[in-house]
Amino acid sequence: MEGGPATVLVVDDSPTKRYLLVSWLSRAGFAVLEAETGSEALARVGVDAIDLVVLDVRLPDLNGFEVCERIKAAHPAMPVIHVSAHAVDVADRAQGLTRGADAYLAEPIEPEELVATSHAVLRYYRARQRAELLAERLLGLADTTVAVHSAPNFARLLEAAAAGAAQIFKSPAAVIAETFDGDCLAGIVAGPGDPATVVPWIVDDTGVPTGTTVRVDEPAAWGLVDWPADDTVTVAAARLREDRAPLYVVVPTATQTARTPVLRQLAQAVAAAVEAQRSFDEEHRIAVTLQRSLLPRRIPQVNGLDMAVRYEPASAQTEVGGDFYELVMLDGHLLLAIGDVAGHSLHAATVMAELRHAVRAYAVEGHQPGEILHRVNELMRTLLPDELATICVLLLHPPSGRVRLASAGHLPPLLSLDGKVEFVQQSAPLLGVRAQRPPDLEFVLPAGATLVFYTDGLIERRDTTIDDGLAALAVSAAWVDDDLDRFCERLLAELAPPEIHDDVAVVVLRRN
């Protein structure tokens, strides 16, 4: 409507009167359609792009008041002007306006009056259309802003942004941004309601200033989707910092209104979410790097033993945790420890490092597992009074297979031999509380037996119990791969969720 003449539907069963109305409106620059009955008018309103209806009150099938009501029920903003040579008194005009008409003209009608009235109601109609469109788009903008800030990772953010843009502008859309690692990705949607996909894309950022700018480009420059024919694309570029690559939102130009306010705001909102995701990814990478640096760098080579470890940090949207493990030879014995500090934060990772070094220190002094845990517990209660942790410590003499084991509230290790599994249970309080601890467990690890140590991230699920997780582990570990690294990989593949919400540490040893 904005780009050409308004289309008026003239509805009158009198050919002569209809001819006059059509002639006056056509000479005034309107595009005019005609209908002879109320039923025909209703059919045309549902199909043709009509901006205004000039409607006679008396029609052969339906009266004009009823036709007006039905038009307004389907198209509340569409203006209707009643015209009549018979229903001309105050009651008729009042009924027409009450039942939805925007104006009421009684014959004889002057051409100037008809044209002026048509322009007047169309001005209101256009203003209402613009207001409703803006309100609808602002609602879509709000929904999209929430969606992008709630996205769990960068790819989901781009998908949410592209889907939101397609829904807001009822068109294909593309959103292009650069990850923290410098990979340029594009979220694309073919149209509103279609699934979003993420693909690699390369953009020349030369000359893009800080802030939000809008430009019109040829579709070939953004050949990500099938853009509408005979149209250009409008590109909003938002750059929040000089040292960051800009974000781009691309939509067909025909969808845009003057000054492109919603497109600008959308680009700014998505750019803010992208910047937050980049910062989180950067911080998470630093934290994970620090956490990994606090863990053993290599596994000791011990005659008579095969060992493998696997450590998986939580998914990128989750903070680092306090899972740790230790493997070291001390005076002919293998010290194995695995534990988990309560909480998920960089602080938990630093507490984890303190506990790991304390375990090593007390083990070097020659203490047995139970005494090591007692001393670590006293250290925690003195220096880290607000912290809690679980830990399992084992000392193994490889030639004989003799084992001494002590636990502090940690999940029981699993023993697998010849297809049979059992959990090595020791009920004991976790670290950080003062309580009596049971004596060490002592047993001999048979040749060919495998011990599996793990943290709760491997088996705990939000939708199942801990017993279900232990049962699933028992099933998976009944058969142990010859290659223990492959065995660890299989445990994670079968037991861990696709997106790990808690750190996972797995330590496996087998006596040959």
Image (tube, rainbow, N blue to C red):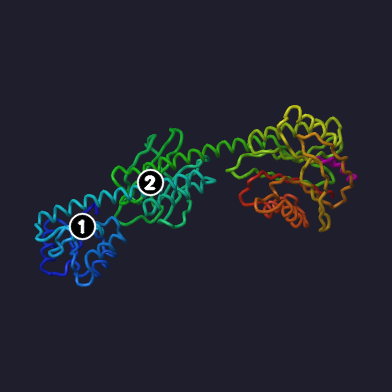
Identify which residue is drawn at 21% across, 50% down.
Answer: 123
> How far is mark 1 from mark 2, CA to CA?
36 Å
Residue 6 seen anywhere in this rendered image of the structure: yes
- Which label was assigned to residue 142? none
Image side of residue 150 versus residue 348, left or right: left
Identify which residue is drawn at 69% across, 34% down.
Answer: 294
- The tag earlier along the polypeptide, 1 or 2, is 1
- Which label was assigned to residue 138? 2
For the N terminus, which image quadrant?
bottom left
- Of badges 1 and 2, nearer the viewer stands 1
Image side of residue 315 versus residue 356, left or right: left
- Magenta part of the chain: 393-406
Residue 52 seen anywhere in this rendered image of the structure: no
- Whole-percent x, y for residue 310 in the image: 70, 45
- Whole-percent x, y for residue 352 in the image: 71, 35
421 part of magenta stretch? no
Q: Which residue is mark 1?
A: 94
Badges 1 and 2: C-beta atoms under 8 Å apart? no
| Count of number-bearing discs | 2
Q: Secondary structure at mark 2?
A: helix
Q: Nearer the viewer, residue 484 or 346?
A: 346
394 part of magenta stretch? yes
- Whole-percent x, y for residue 5 in the image: 19, 55
Identify which residue is drawn at 46% across, 54% down.
Answer: 196
- Whole-percent x, y for residue 378 in the image: 79, 30
Image side of residue 461 versus residue 447, left or right: left
Q: Nearer the viewer, residue 355 or 298?
A: 355
Crowding at dot 2, Cα within 10 Å, few <14 / some 14-19 / many 20+, comes out as some
Magenta region, mostly helix, strand or loop?
A: strand
